[in-house]
Amino acid sequence: MPLVSCQETVYKIGHGGVIFTLGPVSFTAEAGQVWALIGANGAGKSTLFRLLTGALFPSSGQIKIQGQVSLLPQGVSIPGKLTVTEVLDYIALLGKIGGKKERAAAVAKAIESIGLQEKAKAKVGTLSGGQHRRLVIAQALLSNPNLLLLDEPTAGLDMEQRGTVKKLIAAEAKDRVTFVSSHIVEDLVGVSTNVLHLCEGRQKYAGDVSGYLACNSEAAPDSQENPWVQAFSYWNSRQESR
């Protein structure tokens, strides 16, 4: 049974006399899959994340999710004077994760999963950019969610730091469905198993990576362009969805 299922999901919202429509969106996602959520600004990516968290309700269609959902929004800020352990313990407390012993165990597991054991008692303000981003991801992992939504998790990081975050995402993907929204194409390569491509609210593609990139051999077999960039342009230009 899939952990996440969207069936003909549509969301409509009006503002200033203009109606934006997302959908219909249809896909099923299983444990271990990492979905690249692709689309230009205004495509509906953030709206879809809000629908998946339950912050918004579909105008029509269905969304079914087995278990908990955790969202890592873009631009999360953490007080620099707190230690890594204090931050995660506070988040665990807010999330009502068991008693004191259960929280301590969950925090220790989260710190180990992001490889910051040596920084457990360090002030957040002393962390590097990559370490800070790993800590932010750890907050989202504390509740052991079945669906993990990451909005631009590598924004503002250098190449080495982005590579570390990619490895973390891949390592934590086994028992859950993960969605990664990113404008950095390189961050999707090698970690994504599936793609959901949106364009102006319309679903252009939902399926595995090989199917998404297969268009390259048909559209421009001799192109030297990045295959992900080439595929993005191809699916954006298609009138029908897949």
Image (tube, rainbow, N blue to C red):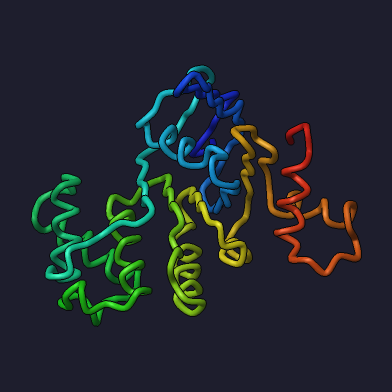
* 192 shown above or below 124: above
Pick the residue in front: 105 or 159.
159
- Quarter of the figure with the C terminus: top right
- Quarter of the figure with the N terminus: top right
The answer to which quarter of the image holds residue 227 is bottom right
**Residue 21 in the image, given as x and y percentages of width and height:** 56, 25
Q: Is residue 239 left or right of residue 202?
A: right
Residue lying farthest to the left in this orientation:
100
Q: Identify the residue at image location x=20%, y=61%.
A: 88
Q: Is residue 24 left or right of residue 124?
A: right
* 46 shown above or below 60: below
Q: Identify the residue at image location x=71%, y=59%.
A: 229
**Residue 154 in the image, given as x and y percentages of width and height:** 45, 65
**Residue 10 in the image, given as x and y percentages of width and height:** 54, 23
* 90 shown above or below 134: above
Number of callouts in the render?
0
Q: Is residue 69 left or right of residue 14?
A: left
Pick the residue in front: 12 or 217.
12
Residue lying farthest to the front in this orientation:
16
Q: Is residue 40 left or right of residue 142?
A: right
Q: Identify the residue at image location x=53%, y=53%.
A: 32
Q: Identify the residue at image location x=37%, y=38%.
A: 67
**Residue 142 in the image, given as x and y percentages of width and height:** 28, 55
